[in-house]
Amino acid sequence: MESAAEHLRPHPASVNVQTNLKIKKLFASRTDKYTYAFNSRSYVDFDIYNVFKEPTVDRSHVCELISTSDKPVVFFLCYDVGYNTTLKVFIRHIVCCVAFPSTHVVKILFFDMRNLCDISPKHQTLIEDEISSRCKKPVDLINAACISKECVYLQKFKGEHEIGWCVAWALFFLENAIAKPLFRGKYLADMTEEQYTKHIGNMYKKIHTAMKRSKTNHFIERWYVSHFGEE
């Protein structure tokens, strides 16, 4: 059983929401290659209640921007995972997304930390159908965790008693896969699907290898706490 001492702090859930939103806004300010559908009061821009069965909430006009923007649209999506029997709490999960507007099928790059089939066999289809229904456009979800031949699970070493690190992961991918050049000065927004598939797949593999080596959650914890000038 892991202890709190094994983890670096602050924890994303213990930090004021506005502080995390400032980090999110800072990353978005670094490039204008995207349209940012960001809510000013919530981490979540597009809320799907796949377990609770409540209506989907588009907090940031994501669907409208997908229809009108000539740039890729960046937003944070939240979905239900389910009840955690260890912690006795219901888990919801936040993911950074990039939608590529199209008159045909809208491709959405989904920076998750796992194979969505681990939640349920139809989970990815459910999310695609919900976004499609809400935005009135066909949607093809590209799960970055499974963009290579094998899916990776980046939260494997977070421990049974840690939740909330998905906020840090969403911010991490916003900064490192979107707001910075992805490869040799070229941004994700400038790449073909074949190109970004290759480079994002490599990014996930490197992260996964580093985490397997240390067998801790410290990769994302160090990255997150570095924005507070402490470990």
Image (cartoon, grey):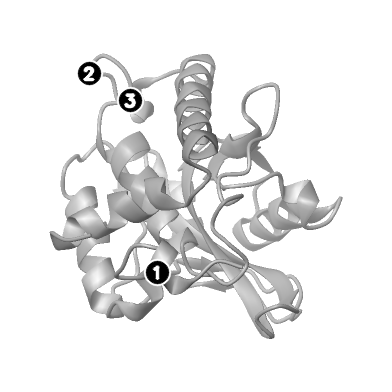
Looking at the rendered structure, the kind of residue marked 1 is Ala
In this rendering, is residue 85 above or below 62? below
What is the C-alpha distance between the residues marked 2 and 1? 39 Å
159 or 165, which is in the foreground? 159
Q: Quadrant of the N terminus?
A: bottom right
Quadrant location of residue 161? Answer: bottom right
Residue 133 location in percent, x, y? 70, 59
Look at the numbered disc 2 and give the secondary structure of its residue.
Answer: loop
What is the C-alpha distance between the residues marked 3 and 2? 7 Å
165 or 112, which is in the foreground? 165
Tell me the residue that label 3 is attached to: 182
In this rendering, is residue 35 above or below 145? below
Q: Quadrant of the C terminus?
A: bottom left
What is the C-alpha distance between the residues marked 1 and 3? 34 Å
- The disc at residue 5 is 1
Tell me the residue that label 2 is attached to: 185
Q: Are marks 1 and 3 in contact (CB under 8 Å)?
A: no
Could you tell me which residue is drawn at 57 percent across and 47 percent down? Answer: 113
Could you tell me which residue is drawn at 36 percent across and 35 percent down? Answer: 177
Looking at the rendered structure, the kind of residue marked 2 is Gly
Looking at the rendered structure, the kind of residue marked 3 is Leu
